[in-house]
């Protein structure tokens, strides 16, 4: 009987596993890096063990350190979450060798499926060898790990070498394994997967299908169960292939078998020997707790002969601290306020006041809606996201709402090319034109401009804000009744709430201010100083760091005086475990290079200058 579980991961998955453990009466143990000293998962666990350092390789990916922490804390079992160690056979063996229970599949099963190349061989498939023009497009893919890291689409043969180097670098950083392979890339297919659960008594459940086609950087954004629009024949085939894969390696525990579906044909991608980020949609549809089932299987309990019956439809959206309009650039800073309607399930590793750092994945939370039909579940999730309060760094919340309400998604005609086709439209700014005025009136509340009685109108006051990348200036006046502005009626104004009547319609604006960062309902503003700082200027062609991170590479042969072409990659930043390419903005000459590999940079740091020819 398991009594104490250490979770070898961080963030929302650790918090999610702890929730089930608490409900089962099991003591919880967290591990945390120095960067996560105040993280939610470390605060909510019964016991927490420090992993000195901040880099993933020195902390959460150090198997020996994790096992020592489990032994020192008195844990009798380890749950790997769904990070890299969850698919490490060596880590599983180290846990078992330490006399601890392993809440996961046998090391031999992990070993057989952990490498995507070996998994394909097991399923009678093989990656591409020598790539020719006829093979294009192809996908460069990390052999280990997941989450879209170490993956690159190649459409031109001359780009293959650079894609291989970049994928190896990212995979080595994220997983500690730089092995990559090349496979055909299926354009506009659907990403469909099957959740499996197996016990030690020979029973294997296939728990329905999930569609995970909406992806950015090959990482899932919106997932749902069951996958809509599949024929009964294809669904049965997918279930059979998933069970076959599990039985081929004597699988035990929870796992996922992934496919790319084109038409009525399924192409095997890989088997993930772990719990998936999107497991809550399966839990909602089948009415089970997969973490609880993992623990029961690890204790030797048998599954029923048949899985529970599926009911209704569930949809999950991943909320990221990132800016989709700026090449999905991750965002950092303080999450001042985070509240979600209780009509949906929330899995998160953050709460009010937490800092979003640069070291780890930018996912803040998962929101999950369940309803009798797909249309109802989609509407429910979109509405909950729309009404959520998110004060802090830029997120992908608006993108998620628009995606869920997009006709291609609501009619279930989406595929993996969804964001390639629609990202520009989905990220088109639609700022509330009255938000800056509401912010100005809230700020002006109580600031009377009357030193004594005057029989003349007060002079208009002006304030400037940046909203959706554009600068806005608004004007208002103080009068005997309070505040007034042209074109609207000011019904109420205080520091937290402004009520305006616009074209006969009463509108409420909730205001929250954190320094120069202002949130008006769901609109984010930045207050500008009355007099701009004359020193905050950069030469034309300056390349500024879009995020804090580490310079991991500089293009070969790049020095001051080098001629460059517009769009040519100059250097690469690593932030939140992803590589981000910095390219030349214009054709010209590199007149300055201010960074070297290994250098840490902050947002807005001057990286290089390209002087236009």
Image (spheres, helix red, strand yellow):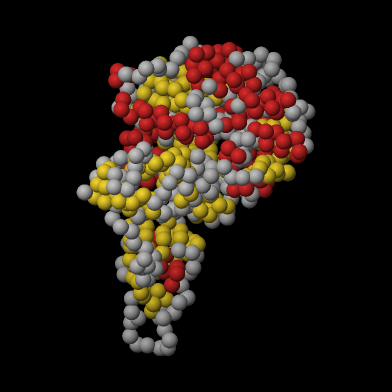
Number of numbered tags placed on the structure image = 0
Q: Is residue 272 visible?
A: yes
Q: Is residue 580 visible?
A: no
The quadrant the N terminus occupies is top right
Residue 48: image quadrant is top right
Residue 262: image quadrant is top left
Q: Position of residue 474 (x, y in %)?
A: 34, 67
User: Residue at horizontal 46%, vertical 13%?
Assistant: 125
Left or right, 32 with respect to 143, comes to right
Q: Position of residue 56 (x, y in %)?
A: 57, 39
Residue, far top:
124
Residue closest to the eye, 420 or 88: 88
User: Residue at horizontal 53%, vertical 44%?
Assistant: 359
Residue 540: image quadrant is bottom left
Question: Eyeballing the image, is 564 above or below 2?
Answer: below
Left or right, 521 with respect to 535, comes to right
User: Residue at horizontal 53%, vertical 38%?
Assistant: 368
User: Residue at horizontal 40%, vertical 16%?
Assistant: 129
Q: Position of residue 411 (x, y in %)?
A: 38, 31
Q: Position of residue 381 (x, y in %)?
A: 48, 40
Residue, far left:
613
Left or right, 415 with respect to 239, comes to left
Question: Eyeballing the image, is 41 above or below 466?
Answer: above
């Amino acid at each position: 009987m398991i009594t104490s579980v250490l979770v070898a991961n961080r963030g929302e998955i650790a918090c999610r596993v702890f929730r089930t453990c608490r409900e089962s009466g099991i003591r919880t143990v967290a591990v945390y890096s120095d960067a996560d000293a105040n993280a939610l998962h470390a605060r909510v666990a019964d016991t927490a063990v420090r992993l000195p350092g901040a880099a993933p390789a020195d902390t959460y990916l150090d198997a020996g350190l994790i096992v020592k922490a489990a032994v020192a804390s008195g844990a009798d079992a380890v749950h790997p979450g769904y990070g890299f160690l969850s698919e490490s056979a060596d880590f599983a063996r180290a846990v078992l060798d330490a006399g601890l229970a392993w809440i996961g599949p046998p090391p031999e099963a992990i070993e057989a499926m952990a490498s995507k190349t070996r998994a394909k061989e097991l399923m009678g498939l093989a990656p591409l060898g020598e790539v020719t023009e006829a093979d294009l497009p192809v996908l460069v893919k990390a052999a280990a790990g997941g989450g879209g890291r170490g993956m690159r689409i190649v459409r031109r043969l001359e780009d293959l070498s650079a894609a291989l180097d970049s994928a190896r670098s990212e995979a080595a950083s994220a997983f500690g394994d730089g092995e990559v392979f090349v496979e055909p890339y299926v354009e506009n297919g659907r990403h469909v997967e099957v959740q499996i659960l197996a016990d030690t008594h020979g029973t294997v459940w296939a728990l329905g299908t999930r569609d995970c086609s909406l992806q950015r950087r090959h990482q899932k954004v919106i997932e749902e169960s069951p996958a809509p629009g599949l024929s009964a024949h294809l669904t049965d085939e997918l279930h059979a292939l998933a069970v076959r894969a599990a039985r081929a390696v004597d699988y035990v525990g929870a796992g996922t078998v992934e496919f790319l579906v084109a038409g009525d044909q399924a192409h095997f991608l890989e088997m993930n020997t772990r719990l998936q980020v999107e497991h809550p949609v399966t839990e909602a549809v089948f009415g089970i707790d997969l973490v609880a089932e993992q623990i029961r299987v690890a204790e030797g309990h048998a599954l029923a002969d048949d899985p529970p019956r599926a009911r209704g439809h569930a949809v999950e959206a991943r909320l990221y601290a990132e800016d989709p309009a700026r090449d999905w650039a991750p965002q950092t800073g303080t999450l001042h306020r985070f509240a979600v309607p209780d009509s949906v399930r929330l899995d998160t590793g953050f709460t009010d006041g937490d800092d979003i750092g640069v070291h780890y994945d930018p996912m803040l939370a998962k929101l999950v809606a369940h309803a009798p039909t797909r249309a109802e579940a989609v509407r429910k999730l979109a509405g909950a996201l729309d009404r959520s309060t998110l004060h802090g760094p830029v997120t992908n919340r608006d993108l998620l709402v628009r995606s869920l309400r997009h006709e291609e998604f609501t009619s279930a005609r989406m595929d993996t090319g969804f964001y390639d086709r629609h990202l520009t439209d989905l990220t088109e700014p639609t700022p509330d034109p009255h938000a800056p005025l509401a912010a100005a009136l809230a700020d002006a509340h109580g600031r009377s401009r009357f030193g004594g009685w005057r029989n003349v109108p007060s002079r208009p006051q002006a304030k400037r804000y940046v909203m959706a990348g554009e600068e806005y200036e608004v004007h208002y006046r103080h009068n005997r009744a309070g505040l007034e502005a042209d074109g609207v009626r000011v019904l109420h104004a205080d520091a937290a709430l402004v009520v305006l009547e616009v074209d006969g319609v009463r509108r409420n604006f909730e205001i929250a201010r954190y320094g120069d960062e202002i949130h008006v309902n769901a609109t984010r503003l930045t207050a500008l100083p009355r007099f701009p700082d004359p020193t905050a200027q950069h030469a034309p062609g300056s390349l500024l760091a879009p995020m804090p991170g580490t310079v991991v590479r500089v293009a070969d042969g790049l020095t001051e005086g080098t001629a460059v072409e517009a769009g040519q990659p100059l250097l690469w930043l690593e932030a939140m475990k992803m590589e981000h390419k910095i390219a030349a903005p214009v054709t010209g000459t590199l007149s300055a290079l201010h960074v070297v590999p290994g250098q840490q940079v902050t947002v807005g740091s001057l990286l290089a200058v390209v002087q236009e020819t």
